[in-house]
Amino acid sequence: MPTTTVQLSGGNATVAYEITGTGPGVVLVHGTSAGRAQWAPLTAEIADRYTVLALDYSGSGDTVDHGGPLTLGDLAAEVRAAADHAGLDRFHLVGHSLGSAIAAHLAATDPQRVRSLLLHAGWVRTDTRMDAEFRYWIGLFRADAEHGTTLLAQHLTLAAFGPGYWSRISAEEHAAVVKQFVEMIAPGTDRQTEVDRTVDLSGLLDRITAPTLVLASAHDRIIPAEQQQQLVAAIPDARYAEIDAGHGAPAEAPEDFHAKIIGFLGAQSAEPRKTPDIQ
């Protein structure tokens, strides 16, 4: 697996990533507590026509760093370093949740690198309610580490999935999903969630020049749709679309989620300054 070293605010990080396929570059940035494996199903769908880079940023997977506090700029620097190491001068950039904040930061601070930008479940600035949510995650994560419980995984499944999930799943099936979440939760989840608490892109978003799709989940209980409407208002060349799912749309509604991404990427590859009608 390729790795590259980058200097962060607190020390060095050795960033691990996977690169698959051939064609224009697409860089995928996962959400809090996840890792590059989040993108494996999408990568399988698009690697026949894109060079797909999916990385683990600090706190997840095979990336190793100094173990201290992180900043949004640090995580954006890791994405940039992985793209540099892979030889991707310009690329389409897709982020989910914290990955959206990281992607927006990179697109604003290094705009010439980003051909197009898709932000799912992103936000402009962490408000008081969101901060309370993130502090609760950290508390659950640390309680689980101390007592061997699964409180964070149980909470995340309650918060992340919309009514479509709950209408079709049995109690036994949901218990299996909780187990999958337990196995997925990254060892640096608390450090990543501290970054969630600090997100403030309000002074950067007008620097983004890439055509942008802000994709909201209609039933998102973690990042409400109003936050994404604020992104649309702040990014010069942005439009808005919704998916009928909760915050965890990549797992809850993968076919629709992938279709939105693939449609947007296809339109941007063909006509860089236009976005498709995917409402």
Image (spheres, rainbow, N blue to C red):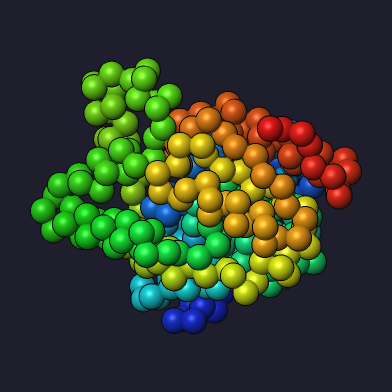
Please determine whether, in this image, residue 168 is positioned above or below residue 129. above
Side of 215 where 135 appears, left or right: left
- Which residue: 86% across, 50% down? 273
47 above or below 116?
above
Q: Mark yes or no: residue 84 visible.
A: no
Image location (x, y in percent) of residue 174:
28, 27
Residue 81 location (% of width, % of height):
63, 67
Most foreground residue, 270 or 48:
270
Question: For this rendering, which residue is in front, 179 or 20?
Answer: 179
Q: Nearer the viewer, residue 265 or 88?
A: 265
Residue 275 visible in the displayed image: yes
Q: Is residue 73 left or right of residue 160?
A: right
Q: Residue at x 64, y 48 (%)?
A: 214
Identify the residue at image location x=32%, y=56%. Answer: 133
Q: Relative to 103, say whether 242 is above or below.
A: above
Q: Is residue 193 left or right of residue 54?
A: left
Number of numbered tags placed on the structure image: 0
Q: Position of residue 190 (x, y in %)?
A: 32, 62
Residue 229 coordinates in the image, percent (x, y): 60, 51
> In the shown orientation, is residue 260 left or right of residue 225?
right
- In which quadrant is the C terminus drawn? top right
User: Which residue is painted at 65% across and 39% down in the image?
Assistant: 241
- Furthest-left residue in this view: 147
